Image (cartoon, rainbow, N blue to C red):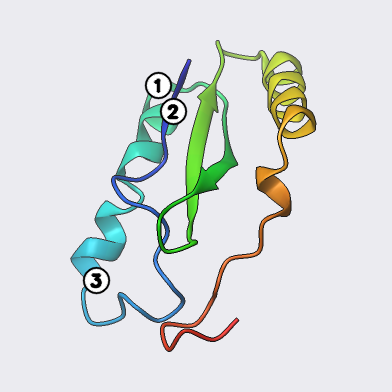
Amino acid sequence: MLGPIAPTVAFKLGEMMDDPLAMYLSDIYTISANLAGIPGISVNCGTGADGMPVGLQLMAKPFDEPTLLCVARAFEAATDHHAARPPVAATGGS
């Protein structure tokens, strides 16, 4: 199964320090695998308009980590999204 890891693209380092609720909610989609007791992994699947990464969460049936890791590795081998380096600082630095 696959799904998003966050409702938005990644935010720059320090950008959400004034909004802890937004920081908490940015991780909300990754909780389902933990609650269901299934393995999950996040991989980069592209970038947004501002160059910040977009994450894809892959999930597998219980105790099927080998398949999950193989699928994640195959996705990374078929794309170059994992090699992208986004701007990091909220001030626009890299």
75 over 16 or under it: above or below = above
Quarter-of-image position of residue 30: top left
**Mark 2 surroundings: few (<14), some (14-19) or many (≥20) residues within 10 A:** some
Nearer-the-camera pick, 65 or 84: 84
Contact flag, marks 2 and 1 (Cβ < 8 Å): yes
Q: Tell which circle, 3 or 1, labels the residue nearer the N-terminal end.
A: 3
Q: Tell which circle, 3 or 2, labels the residue nearer the N-terminal end.
A: 3
Can you identify the residue that label 3 sits on? 20
Q: How many marks?
A: 3
Kindly identify the residue that appears in the image at 67 percent across and 13 percent down. Answer: 64
Kindly identify the residue that appears in the image at 64 percent across and 14 percent down. Answer: 63
Secondary structure, mark 1, is helix
Kindly identify the residue that appears in the image at 72 percent across and 14 percent down. Answer: 67
Can you identify the residue that label 2 sits on? 33
Can you identify the residue that label 1 sits on? 36
**Mark 1 surroundings: few (<14), some (14-19) or many (≥20) residues within 10 A:** few
63 over 31 or under it: above or below = above
Quarter-of-image position of residue 65: top right
**Mark 3 surroundings: few (<14), some (14-19) or many (≥20) residues within 10 A:** few
Secondary structure, mark 2, is helix
Amino acid beneath label 3? Pro
Q: Is residue 86 left or right of residue 37?
A: right
Quarter-of-image position of residue 28: top left
**CA separation in Å, label 3 and label 2:** 22 Å
The image position of residue 56, as x and y in percent, is: 50, 35
Kindly identify the residue that appears in the image at 21 percent across and 74 percent down. Answer: 19
**CA separation in Å, label 3 and label 1:** 25 Å
**CA separation in Å, label 2 and label 1:** 5 Å
Q: Is residue 56 left or right of residue 41?
A: left
The image position of residue 21, as x and y in percent, is: 19, 64
Contact flag, marks 3 and 2 (Cβ < 8 Å): no
Secondary structure, mark 3, is helix
